[in-house]
Image (spheres, grey):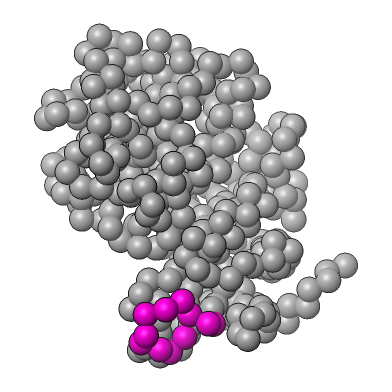
Amino acid sequence: MSTISIPVTKTTQSKLSETDFSSLVFGKSISDHMFVADYQNGAWGDFRIVPYGPMEIYPGNATLHYGQAIFEGMKAYKNEKGEVLVFRAEANAKRLNESAARMCMPQLPESVFLEALKQLLSLDRDWVPQGKGSSLYIRPFMFAMDNYLGVKASDSYRFMIFTSPVGAYYSKPVSVKVETTYTRACEGGTGEAKAAGNYAASLYPALQAQKEGYDQLLWTDGKTHSQIEESGTMNVMFKIKGNLITAPTHGGTILKGITRNSVLQLAKDWGQAVEERFLAVTELEEALKNGSLEEAFGVGTAATIAFINKINVNGKDYLLPEPKPDAFSTRVLSTLDSIKYGEVQDPHQWILTI
């Protein structure tokens, strides 16, 4: 029995019958309901689930002017029994609060996060697509609510969750370009927080890369542009001479990816050699030239595993072979999918069943 009371107002006009689940575009279709909670006078309250729709805010809303906004991205799946399975919800709840601390925002009790999630997904369970390659994307987020133009941390906040049925984020392998002009994050900044402003700052350089024919960027460090950090909005991994290499997350510039953590755990389970260190751009270039780069792939909630088939370094394109069935990236994608869809045992208790 729930210890948190969440009143529910159901929609009178469901969009479910109007949604084409056979051709889902990522982020375009929104489910019927959303969870809302407000932070005022030092406490969270006014919990409610209501129909998804517009909300009223003042033009002086602090978020619109000073960017106090954070979010999470997670997914739910449906198994053959019709049960809804959420992947690593507790990890998302924890990371939301880590972002909140960096952005001077209040902590949200994990019990509220998880109970809201359970009740929202129970209500909108028919929105969770069934079948491999599709899922329900879940967007929890928090933002400032003060109607005040002074530059300071807001005193009031709103936390919300809404969901969206989605298909595959990438339908094919991606091409990337090593970015040596623009910077995603610097030490002492907000790179490790899932803050809205980080993504706004990445849009212009990503657009320039897309105009040149690349899907994403390989971000480098902000000081010297000599070390690989992330790929687009994902963590990135390389397999060179049998070793899996990925940037460490303790420096404050890189998001502590939950998919990244899951991949590294499976690598450990399988005895795969892992190096959590920065890969130098020169080292990457040399590995591309001599053929010792066996695999390169992005890891994140949206795509899970995004295979990289082309890398541009210093103006030159290098093509990567298609991953073989026994490649690490292929195996880890298959294993994660099998866990998420409830097809195999969940040895690390990553799944929350609703």
Location of the N terminus by quadrant is bottom right
Q: Is residue 115 magenta?
A: no
Give the x, y percent position of residue 291.
28, 10
Q: Is residue 152 magenta?
A: yes
- Left or right of 198 on screen, residue 40: right
Residue 71 in view here: no
Give the x, y percent position of residue 211.
14, 47
- Residue at the image point whose x is 51% and y is 55% from the top: 73
Give the x, y percent position of residue 22.
47, 52
Task: Specify the segment rendered in magenta.
Answer: 146-156
Q: Is 262 placed above or below 144 here?
A: above
- Residue at the image point whose x is 17% and y is 43% from the top: 181
Q: Specify the farthest residue to the right.
A: 1
Q: Nearer the viewer, residue 276 or 166?
A: 276
- Residue at the image point whose x is 59% and y is 35% from the top: 262
- Residue at the image point whose x is 61% and y is 85% from the top: 40
Q: Is 91 placed above or below 145 here?
A: above
Give the x, y percent position of residue 69.
44, 68
